[in-house]
């Protein structure tokens, strides 16, 4: 079975943030780290070269593909933040209501800046995602 290419690294989160040139993106990155650390109880770590992740869980799809992923995470990409904070489950679609200005990808939510969304709604979404992960998958504790 193929191994996942994206895993936690020893790369410094601080050094990664230092490469971001947009001041608002840096401020939003620090705020997202603060929020996700509080919700997960986990420290920020680099997952691959551009994702800041928090915690870890083991997943397995019906196809048999399995791997590990952060409980929550985000990537401060140039065009938009990619937020890995949503289950994608139909039962959680209500969490998108009132979230604010965003677009959806297959496995993430894209926002231009944190001010475009309601932080309380984001908090609820992340907590629901953690509950979902803890129910459906095996959380890995370091």
Image: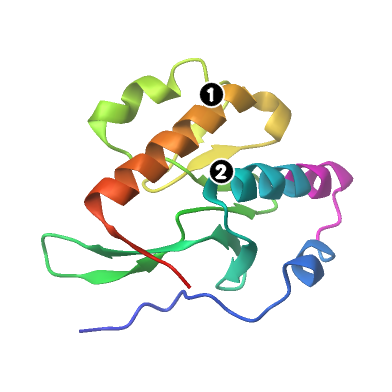
Where's residue 126, x and y in %?
A: 48, 38
Residue that label 1 marks: 121
Residue located at (63% from left, 61% from top) = 43
Which SS class for mark 1?
A: helix
Q: Which residues are magenta?
A: 20-28
Which numbered tag is attached to residue 78? none
Which numbered tag is attached to residue 39? 2
Where's residue 65, x and y in %?
A: 20, 70
* Corner quadrant of residue 35: top right
Nearer-the-camera pick, 142 or 13: 142
Q: Is residue 5 magenta?
A: no
In the image, which is nearer the foreground, mark 1 or mark 2?
A: 2
Where's residue 78, x and y in %?
A: 70, 52
Q: Residues within 10 Å of mark 2 (few under 14, many from 20)?
A: some
Q: Is residue 140 left or right of residue 46?
A: left
Label 1 to label 2: alpha-carbon separation: 13 Å
Q: Main secondary structure of the magenta part?
A: helix
Which SS class for mark 2?
A: helix
Confirm or deny contact between disc 1 and disc 2 (CB under 8 A).
Answer: no
Q: Return the disc, 1 or 2, that comes first in the chain's sequence.
A: 2
């Amino acid at each position: 079975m193929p191994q996942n290419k994206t895993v936690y690294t020893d790369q410094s989160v601080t050094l990664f943030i230092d490469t971001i040139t947009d001041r608002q993106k840096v401020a939003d990155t620090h705020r997202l780290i603060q929020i996700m650390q509080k919700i997960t109880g986990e420290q920020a770590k680099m997952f691959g070269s551009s994702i800041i992740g928090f915690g870890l869980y083991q997943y397995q799809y019906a196809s048999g593909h399995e791997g590990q992923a952060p409980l929550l995470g985000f990537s401060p990409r140039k065009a938009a933040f990619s937020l890995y904070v949503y289950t994608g489950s139909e039962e959680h679609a209500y969490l998108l209501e009132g979230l604010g200005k965003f677009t959806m990808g297959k496995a993430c939510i894209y926002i231009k800046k944190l001010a475009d969304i309601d932080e309380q709604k984001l908090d609820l979404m992340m907590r629901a995602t953690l509950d979902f992960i803890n129910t459906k998958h095996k959380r890995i504790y370091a």
